[in-house]
Amino acid sequence: MEGEKFRRQHPIKKLALDFYCYKLRFGIELDGDYHSERSQIFYDKDRTEVLENYNLHIIRFENQEVIEGIEIVLGKIRETLLTLRIDRI
């Protein structure tokens, strides 16, 4: 996307990111229905904080967002890519 390469199921320490752009240190997580359970919400929050402590930028989308509004999701990803590129300058 936007000329950037993404890896699928990329390992970071003991975790795996659904999609990861190594060049921009940018991860995308897709969350299924079970991510709405209370214990999973706390786990996901902690997991995101751990990843951000590795200086990674993480965004999350629920599967339903992808299914019902893929263009919106892709737009948010593009916007994030552009922001991260600018930040690197």
Image: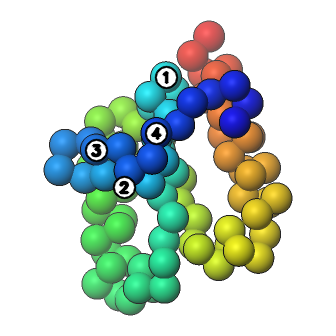
Whether tag 1 and tag 2 are in contact, CB under 8 A, the answer is no
Query: On residue 11, which mark appears?
Result: 3
Q: Give how far apart the Cα atoms at labels 1 and 2 are.
A: 19 Å
Determine which residue is flagged by label 2.
48
Amino acid tagged 2 = Thr
Q: Give how far apart the Cα atoms at labels 2 and 3 are.
A: 14 Å
User: Could you tell which of marks 1 and 3 lies nearer the N-terminus?
Assistant: 3
At numbered mark 4, what does the secondary structure look like: helix, strand or loop?
strand
- Where residue 81 appears, as percent x and y from the top left, is 66, 34
Amino acid tagged 3 = Pro
Indicate left or right for 76 with 15 as reference.
right
- Where residue 42 appears, as percent x and y from the top left, is 31, 75
Vertical relation: 85 (above or below) 81: above
Residue at 73 percent across and 30 percent down: it is: 2
Q: Residues within 10 Å of mark 3 (few under 14, many from 20)?
A: few
Residue at 82 percent across and 59 percent down: it is: 71
At numbered mark 3, what does the secondary structure look like: helix, strand or loop?
strand
Whether tag 4 and tag 1 are in contact, CB under 8 A, the answer is no
Q: Give how far apart the Cα atoms at labels 1 and 3 are.
A: 15 Å
Vertical relation: 47 (above or below) 65: above
Determine if residue 58 is in view. Answer: no
Q: Residues within 10 Å of mark 4 (few under 14, many from 20)?
A: few
Judge depth for marks 2 and 4 and give the one in front: 4
At numbered mark 2, what does the secondary structure look like: helix, strand or loop?
helix
Judge depth for marks 1 and 2 and give the one in front: 1
Whether tag 1 and tag 3 are in contact, CB under 8 A, the answer is no
Q: Quadrant of the C terminus?
A: top right
Determine which residue is flagged by label 1.
23
Q: Quadrant of the N terminus?
A: top right
Q: Give how far apart the Cα atoms at labels 4 and 3 are.
A: 10 Å
User: Could you tell which of marks 2 and 3 lies nearer the N-terminus?
Assistant: 3
Determine which residue is flagged by label 4.
7
